[in-house]
């Protein structure tokens, strides 16, 4: 997921939470935003099927990836130090200071009604967005770079 997101130069966001492996996909974004109150959660890698040497190798590679993105080394160490049965949830300021997120923004918050959009809603083009239940469609804009941004109603 990281490679796909990173390769397409996507902006990643979360308006609630992103824990565990989700954070690695999230880090693929060329810009990364969390909504006010949203949380990212980290822990060391583990597997129920792979042996310890494979897990350690995967974790080392993920640590190198994070460092290559400019994430602070002390943050990376702390993120992977949390045991598999616990989640370390850094504050928004810790995330920003460590260069994990670009910033905190409510621009990408999606209201619950909009979350009920059919799966093909995200494939819609500006001006052709399916209506959510109750008739509320997300606001859609396209940047000069051709990036389509979907925003919840009222955002």
Image (cartoon, rainbow, N blue to C red):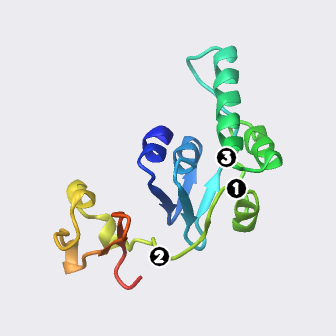
Where in the figure is residue 50, as x and y percent of width and height? 59, 17
The local secondary structure at tag 1 comes to loop
Name the element at disc 3: loop
Q: Which residue is mark 3?
A: 42
Which residue in the protein does label 2 denote? 107
Q: Is residue 107 left or right of residue 127?
A: right
Going from N to C along the chain, the mark reached first, 1 or 3, is 3
Q: Label 1 to label 3, Cα distance in Å? A: 7 Å
Q: Is residue 106 left or right of residue 83?
A: left
The quarter of the picture where residue 138 lies is bottom left
Quadrant in which residue 67 is drawn: top right
Res 20 → quadrant? top right
Q: Which residue of the protein is positioned furthest toward the right in this rendering?
A: 74
The residue where tag 1 is placed is 89
Residue 38, given in percent of the width and then of the height, sits at 58, 66
Tell me, for residue 81, which label it has, or none: none
Asked if marks 1 and 2 touch (Cβ < 8 Å), the reply is no
> Marks 2/3: CA distance?
24 Å
Q: CB of mark 1 within 8 Å of CB of mark 3?
A: yes
Residue 20 visible to the viewer: yes
């Amino acid at each position: 997921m990281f490679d796909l997101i990173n390769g397409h130069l996507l902006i990643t966001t979360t308006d609630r939470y992103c824990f565990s492996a989700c954070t690695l996909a999230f880090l693929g974004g060329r810009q990364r935003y969390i909504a006010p109150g949203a949380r990212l959660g980290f822990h060391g890698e583990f597997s129920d099927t792979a042996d310890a040497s494979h897990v350690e190798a995967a974790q080392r590679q993920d640590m190198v990836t994070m460092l290559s993105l400019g994430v602070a080394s002390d943050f990376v160490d702390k993120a992977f130090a949390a045991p598999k049965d616990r989640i370390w949830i850094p504050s928004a300021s810790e995330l920003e200071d460590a260069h994990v997120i670009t910033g905190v923004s409510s621009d990408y918050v999606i209201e619950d009604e909009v979350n009920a959009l059919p799966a093909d809603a995200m494939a819609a083009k500006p001006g052709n967005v399916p209506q959510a239940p109750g008739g509320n469609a997300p606001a859609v804009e396209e940047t000069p770079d051709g990036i389509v941004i979907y925003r919840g109603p009222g955002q």
